[in-house]
Amino acid sequence: MAPAPLMADEHVVGPHPSYIEIAKPYIFEQKVQECIAKIGMTEAKEDAVRLQGVAWIDNVRKSMQLPVRTFNTAVVYYHKFRLLHADNEYSYVDAAAAALFTACKIEDTLKKSREILCASWNLKLSPAEHLSPDDPVRYLLQAKLFETHSKSIIGLERLMLEGASFDFRNRHPQKLVIKLVKSCALPKGTVGKTAYNMSLDLYRTFAPLKQTTSTMAIACVELATRLCDADLLRVVGERGIKYRKWSTSRAEVMETLLDLLDLYTHHRPSTTIGSLNSLETFIDIRITLNQEASAGNLPRYTEWITAPRSSPININGFRARNGAVPTSPATPITPGTTSPGQGPTSAIGIRGQSGTVRFMLDAGRAKEEQKTVETYFKAEEEEVEIECEVDRRRPR
């Protein structure tokens, strides 16, 4: 059942001025927690859906031999989609498949939706039982297996693009990781390989939404250096990497390091590097970094604005992560009712029923356009006094 159209304002004269959705290349931790609170998802549920979806994308990507940049883009689209839609509106498999399908188009590694679903299905079978997406002998079987999910993926593709505001700018830290390892003269077989795998594990967190390419690459190289017991002075300190050169700061790198350590501490089996090292190793590194952060007065999360609030947030068991200050309370969004073949209700789609939704990359241009449009819809009133003679004589 489609959502009811929004009632138009009776006082508005003329066409609707339209809505403008500005692209968000960076989504900081405070905004991430606000979005999770609005959709009413608990921390444990959010971690499970996030890790399962990223693992599905990674396994299918390896099966189809897709490049790393497609994996990066797919995971970012998957994260942004989940921040707008509650987990009861979609299946994480459909969302992950739609994110990978969209990323294949953006990164020019075109794959059909049936090919993605077929690769996912073949992961459960032995090599002798693998299916082909265009096998005429097993066409009826494939039609039953893939047809319904294929239509659902195509329907979710539009919501993926809307969730990302049609912003096709993506960040890929793997190339910079290799350059930093070479420039710091670190061993490629140990530090280089570990840092590269960490850059893939990093996408199981929200760090790719918050940090720049250089920040993610520097954090991966530093943590790999600490794990491999290499010369840390080549990365940190006066002889190490210059943060000003890469337009980053120690606070941002520290936030990314702690995000990675949170992943390796609580979800080691779901990562590539976590299972290769003991839990005590990550805890020792975490203690060292916490001492440095306390001595340097570095915040756990950068770009955090503390707003006045009357009561702490408490929505379906949600709580702030890692001792961070919780955000102001928000009312959970009630998801719309959808039919079996229909994708989840999009907030942007609901707004589009009462006016056109336009997506823009330049925030300055959007503000200038809004100011210009407001002049045409601004109601101006002027008081005028008129003196007129009134005949007070009564008629006979």
Image (tube, rainbow, N blue to C red):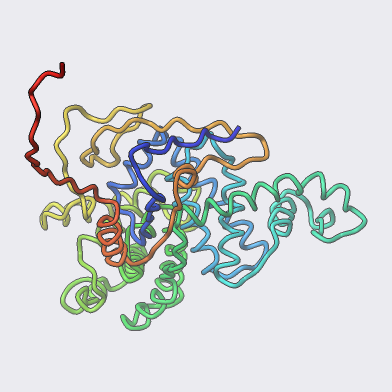
Give the position of the N terminus as an image quadrant: top right
Give the position of the C terminus as an image quadrant: top left
Counting from the top left corner in percent of width and height, residue 2 is at 58, 35
Which residue is outermost to the right?
137
> Tag count in the figure?
0
Q: Nearer the viewer, residue 235 or 117?
A: 117
238 on left or right of 265: left
Q: Nearer the viewer, residue 359 or 330?
A: 359
Q: Nearer the viewer, residue 189 or 373?
A: 373
Counting from the top left corner in percent of width and height, residue 58 is at 57, 57
Q: Residue at x 15, y 77 (%)?
A: 238
Q: Quadrant of residue 254?
A: bottom left
Which residue is outermost to the front?
396
Counting from the top left corner in percent of width and height, residue 78 is at 50, 52
Counting from the top left corner in percent of width and height, residue 386 is at 9, 41
Q: Residue at x 83, y 53 (%)?
A: 129
Q: Quadrant of residue 339?
A: top right
Q: Eyeballing the image, is 156 above or below 216?
A: above
Q: Eyeballing the image, is 317 above or below 256?
A: above
155 on left or right of 266: right
